[in-house]
Amino acid sequence: MTYEQIIKELNNKIYKPIYYLMGDEAYYIDKVTDYIANNVLTEAERSFNQTVLYGKDIDLGAVITTSRRFPMMSNYQVVIIKEAQNIKGIDGSDGPGKSKKPNSFLLYAENPPKSTILVINLKYKSLEKNRKLYKLLEKTGVILDSKKLYDNKLPEWISGYVAQKQLKIDPTAANLIAESLGSDLCKIANEIDKLFIVLPKDIKTITSDYVEKYIGISKEFNNFELQRAIGFKEFLKANRIVNHFGKNINDNPIQFTIKVLFDYFVKILIYHSSQNKSREVLAPAMGVNPFFIEEYAKSARNYSVQKVVQNISIIRQFDLKSKGVNSGRTEPAELLKELVFRLMH
């Protein structure tokens, strides 16, 4: 099930005995866990019927024992297991040795008590679909496989998150946040939430100025502006940004900049390769907001297909150099200067 489907069912008080929340994206795992913790039981019921355990402190036996208890003066008890990835056997695997004891969680999942809502919070791991436990949970519980969002989907996600507060964010500001904060949705949501608190009450649209002022992301010295300067052949601006990065290398790691530039030239190559240059066709193919198609068109005019392919090869070389391959003792700041020079000339 998707996060939205799970929350909709919970809103309608449709509860399942087991919620197996797993995957590399912690944001949705925590959101479902918090919703169940805060909404299923009343405040009075929680005192006796809500238990939060941590995988590093317990074993599988404790999970089963706690989950088989009966609620007190309530229809349900809620048992939340955080950091469940630390519990051996929580994935349904058999015990060690020749005896191969049947897995107790498998037995529990076959016939879970209807009065317990067990939440398994399993971050950075996923249960394989061919496992017996996976097939059991599809029948008796809920599985959320929370996958990392692709980088090109982040601006859209940011826009949707802001829209929940009846606000808008312009595409440039959304891209600025995505490029600067990376793909950690928890981190992005936390920064935007802080922005909501300090924004003037009459503001309806979040711009780059507000992002710079309240989140602290420079609207001038960032990877989004660097790729644009390179694409538009704005040599002075590109050099200014590179020099700033060189003086603040810890805040602007070269490996991240290299990835951004690699993705940028791949998108220009897609633009060149497309027969249909309409925004409706290009935007999904390139994974960008239609708002930016004209910028890529301008960059494509500045860089021929041959130069784009050459630049992708150059970026690959500098990716290796940034990791210490054939770079001698060249500092990251110098590598970045040389990379940008070669891309633009």
Image (spheres, helix red, strand yellow):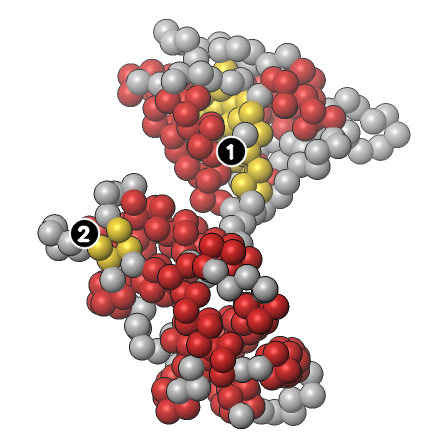
Question: In the rendered image of this protein, does residue 242 appear above or below residue 137?
Answer: below
- Check residue 2 in the rendering and tell me which mark sits there, or answer none: 1
Measured as percent of width and height from the top left, residue 4 is found at 44, 32
- Check residue 216 in the rendering and tell me which mark sits there, or answer none: none
Question: In the rendered image of this protein, does residue 114 appear above or below residue 226?
Answer: above
Tell me the kind of residue under disc 1: Thr
Left or right, 318 with respect to 168, comes to right
Left or right, 234 with respect to 217, comes to right
Mark sitting earlier along the chain (1/2)? 1
Q: Nearer the viewer, residue 53 or 339?
A: 339
Question: In the rendered image of this protein, does residue 85 appear above or below residue 175?
Answer: above
Measured as percent of width and height from the top left, residue 167 is found at 24, 48
Left or right, 223 with respect to 172, comes to right
Residue at horizontal 29 percent and vertical 59 percent from the top: 170
Q: Which residue is mark 2?
A: 204
Question: In the rendered image of this protein, does residue 115 appear above or below residue 291?
Answer: above
- Mark 2 crowdedness (10 Å alpha carbons): few <14, some 14-19, many ≥20: few
Q: Nearer the viewer, residue 51 or 39?
A: 39
Tell me the kind of residue under disc 2: Lys
Measured as percent of width and height from the top left, residue 197 is found at 19, 51
Residue at horizontal 52 percent and vertical 46 percent from the top: 25
**Cα separation between marks 1 and 2:** 30 Å
**Helix, strand, or loop for circle 1?**
loop
Image quarter of the N terminus: top right
Residue at horizontal 64 percent and vertical 79 percent from the top: 309
- Assess whether mark 2 and mark 1 are in contact (beta carbons under 8 angstroms): no
Residue at horizontal 69 percent and vertical 24 percent from the top: 135
**Helix, strand, or loop for circle 2?**
loop
Q: Is residue 311 visible?
A: no
- Mark 1 crowdedness (10 Å alpha carbons): few <14, some 14-19, many ≥20: few
